[in-house]
Image (spheres, rainbow, N blue to C red):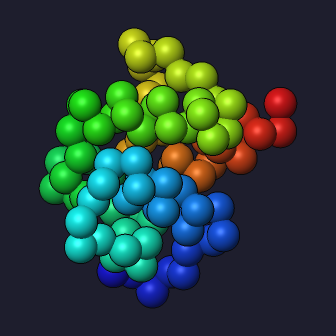
């Protein structure tokens, strides 16, 4: 866990991840905004990415192409995901 507090949007996204993926024993405070969401970080996999993509579309109106090269960057960490939501919200 980092010393960096979650922004309100990062907290909201952490809760979305936890609820969408039904992560047990994980709270938003357990998710470091800079840690990887996949692999050694939160341990998410490609199925989780699909579910999370659908949740982003439902909650924020953000549509991602499943084969877009920048998806790996967007889903790299909670902080990257928050930056994506901020950028797409403005459009």
Who is closer to the viewer here, 83 or 8? 8
Whether residue 42 is situated above or below residue 2 in the rendered picture: above
Of all residues, the one furthest to the right in this rendering is: 91
Q: Residue at x 55, y 37 (%)?
A: 56
Q: Residue at x 50, y 15 (%)?
A: 65
Whether residue 40 is situated above or below residue 76 in the rendered picture: below
Q: Is residue 64 left or right of residue 42?
A: right
Of all residues, the one furthest to the bottom in this rendering is: 3
- Report the quarter where the N terminus lies: bottom left
Q: Is residue 80 left or right of residue 83?
A: left
Task: Identify the image quadrant of residue 34.
Answer: bottom left
Where's residue 57, x and y in %?
59, 30
Who is closer to the viewer here, 6 or 55? 55
Whether residue 60 is situated above or below residue 46 in the rendered picture: below
Task: Identify the image quadrant of residue 71.
Answer: top left
Task: Identify the image quadrant of residue 61.
Answer: top right
The answer to whether any part of residue 16 appears in the image is yes
Where's residue 4, x and y in %?
51, 80
Where's residue 78, x and y in %?
46, 56
Q: How many marks?
A: 0
Where's residue 68, x and y in %?
45, 16
The answer to whether any part of residue 79 appears in the image is no
Q: Residue at x 37, y 74 (%)?
A: 27
- Report the quarter where the C terminus lies: top right
Q: Is residue 80 left or right of residue 90?
A: left
Q: Is residue 75 left or right of residue 26?
A: right
Q: Residue at x 72, y 35 (%)?
A: 88
């Amino acid at each position: 866990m980092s010393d960096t507090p979650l922004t309100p949007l990062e907290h909201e996204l952490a809760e979305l991840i936890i609820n969408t993926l039904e992560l047990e024993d994980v709270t938003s405070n357990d998710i470091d905004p800079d840690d990887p969401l996949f692999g050694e970080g939160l341990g998410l996999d490609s199925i989780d990415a699909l579910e999370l993509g659908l949740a982003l579309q439902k909650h924020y109106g953000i549509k991602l192409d499943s084969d877009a090269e920048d998806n790996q960057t967007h889903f790299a960490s909670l902080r990257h995901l928050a930056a994506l939501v901020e950028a797409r919200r403005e459009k």
